[in-house]
Image: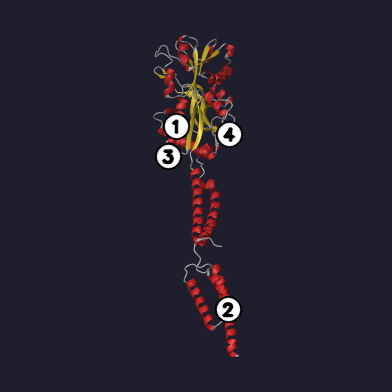
Amino acid sequence: MLLARWMRIALVFGLVVLTAGLGLYAYRYSIRPVTLTVAAGSLDGEGARLMNALASKLGSTANSRIRLKVIDTGTPLGAAEAFARGEADLAIVRGDATDLKGARTVVVITHGVLMLLGLPGSSITDLDHLKGKTIGVVGGPVNQRIASVLDSEYDLSRNKVKFVDLSLPDVAAAIQGKKVQALLFVTPISGRYLAMLRNFFPRDAKKSPTLIPIESAGAIAAAVGAYESFDIPKGTIRGSPAIPEDDLTTLRVPVYLIAKEKLDDDTATQLTQAIMETRSNMLGEHPILAQISAPSTEKDAPIPIHPGAAAYFSGDVKTIFDKYGDQFFYASMLLGMLSSLAAAFWKFMMPAPEGGRPPERLYNITGRIRDAATQEDLDRIEDEIDEILRTELSRDKRDESDASALQIALSRLEYLIKQRRRILQAPLAG
């Protein structure tokens, strides 16, 4: 039994609304913001402040799908530990951090440059002069590995060189109390950090600190992949008198933004793109962002680059057709099927002609032909058949299956009418 027209319209309308709702949900799901947790920490708190500023900028950028939630871990080691425990998707870490299994680099934020300084008034100008002296390691635990590398390369322990950990607030007191004769800093070369370094020493040309070269920096870098040989430019710490007096060889270590290896490639690409495009708008407030660069793509890099970041820096970002070509193909097939279904639904909604479809109406006439008592009855039936044909031929669109059925029905009716006329004429002839 056919449903009432209003019920058929309601059914089709409901299916249209359901399909539209599912499509809207799929679209909204595809463009939803992705929130990533990033662990950041530094001796002066600048690491977390920098990431919070970046998170705020990304959050206010309409076309950015990346959102950052910052966890301030207090120290670089804390950030590495939080990442290793799975508490963060991303982390700001130094390249010499340990326990970074499953980490992949996204960008190089900056480089920490090793600065080994002899205190003002001392005669320390190279590592041989440190025999029997005490070196204050600023930052303590985070710099223990680089101190250990220097100890191993130059056999400092054998020469009775001691290392003591110092926090930033303790540095000034250690210098004034002559508890240390040299300081070991690992810091980015930027205005903020160089100013901090200068403030530890009096502005006295006759009593300036001396920067100690690391002549074996190349050998150390070859043996320990986390470090690189680097030349500090003349006058970096102070311009007059110049400190150092000439370009000076030392070590540096990259500071990375790392991500989990399992982070989706598309998300990593979008994160990298968002950072590189956003940093230019933040340089006025955070000049250190100018040092952001691409990580090494070498296979033997200390921390391999994430494939999503590599795709961005190589310009090999996949287009939507590259990524979803198969889906588009199957979607086109599905669209064809939906078009056929839509046509069927439309036909389902349209009211049937009074008395049914033309083939059905013609079929119903067969019984009346057999029951016709006079030639006039047959004439009226033929007039009715003509009207059905006239109505069908006046339609703009006709179903091919109906046309075939109509032709068969007409042939059958014509035969039955002829037969019935012969039967009705037979008594008259007799």
Structure colour scheme = secondary structure
Label pair 1/3, CB-CB below 8 angstroms: no
Secondary structure state at the residue bearing disc 4: loop
Which residue lies at the image location 55% right of the left edge and 12% below the top edge? 162
Amino acid type, label 2: Asp
What is the CA distance from the residue labelled 1 to the residue labelled 4? 30 Å
What is the CA distance from the residue labelled 2 to the residue labelled 3? 79 Å
Left or right: 427, with 64 as reference point: right
Q: Which mark is residue 371?
A: 2
Secondary structure state at the residue bearing disc 1: helix
Few, some or many residues within 10 Å of mark 3 (<14, 14–19, 20+): few
- x then y, percent, for residue 69: 49, 31
Secondary structure state at the residue bearing disc 2: helix
Question: Of tags 2 and 1, which is closer to the observer?
Answer: 2
**Location of the C terminus (image quadrant):** bottom right
Q: Which residue is mark 1?
A: 54
Q: Which residue is mark 4?
A: 299
Name the one closer to the observer, 379 or 331: 379
Mark nearer the N terminus (3 vs 4): 3
Q: Which residue is mark 3?
A: 62
Amino acid type, label 1: Leu
Q: Which mark is residue 133?
A: none
Mark nearer the N terminus (1 vs 4): 1
Q: How many numbered marks, from 0 up?
A: 4
Label pair 2/3, CB-CB below 8 angstroms: no
